[in-house]
Amino acid sequence: MTKLGIVAIINLLFTAGCSVGEPVRISANGMVKWSDGHTEGMHVSQTGSSLTFANYSNEVGAPALVIFARIDSARNDNCEYFYVETAVKKRLKVCETGEVTLFNRGKVVKVGHMVKPRY
């Protein structure tokens, strides 16, 4: 392989590795304020059975949206539980007080507070 070919391949690898697609935009009607200071918009379905977030992950092949579906049989302490169908171990607990807890494999990842949705 010539030097030009090697340089072209290296350039292609760097370009492909550094390119990040534009995050998907959602019609947010609610927001979570996380304890780390970040806020994240979400779309709450009219029935409240699903919560949709834009996925800002840089993982290769990651879906543009993360959709949490409510687990109807898992309600207690005035809280509802949601899960991601493609990543069952990722769960979200939303309480009537507005407290939001994100779990991954049973461990707390983030804690925050939900701003009530508007329709």
Image (tube, rainbow, N blue to C red):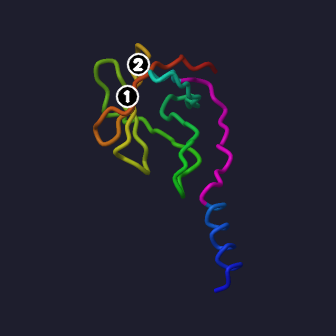
What residue do we see at 37% from left, 37% from top? 91
Q: Amino acid at mark 1?
A: Lys
Residues tagged 1 and 2 counted as in contact (Cβ below 8 A): yes
Examine the rendered structure and indicate whether residue 104 appears above or below residue 110. below
* Image point (67%, 38%), residue name: 25
Magenta-colored stretch includes residue 33 = no
With 29 as the anchor, is 50 left or right in this view?
A: left
Q: Residues within 10 Å of mark 1 (few under 14, many from 20)?
A: some
Residue lying furthest top? 97
The residue lying toward the viewer, choosing from 44 and 54, is: 54
As drawn, the label of residue 22 is none
Residue 5 percent coordinates (x, y): 68, 80
In what element is the residue under mark 2?
Answer: strand
User: Whole-percent x and y of residue 101?
Assistant: 38, 27
Answer with mark 1 or mark 2, whichever residue precedes in sequence: 1
**Label 1 – label 2 distance at C-alpha:** 8 Å
Q: Which residue is mark 2?
A: 99
Quarter placement of the C terminus: top right
Magenta range is: 17-31
Query: Element at badge 1?
Result: strand
Q: Main secondary structure of the magenta part?
A: loop
Does 99 sit above or below residue 10? above
Tell me what residue is drawn at x 46 percent, y 24 percent. Answer: 36
On residue 93, which mark appears? Answer: 1
Residue type for callout 2: Glu
Q: Nearer the viewer, residue 22 or 43?
A: 22
Residue 86 location in percent, x, y? 44, 51
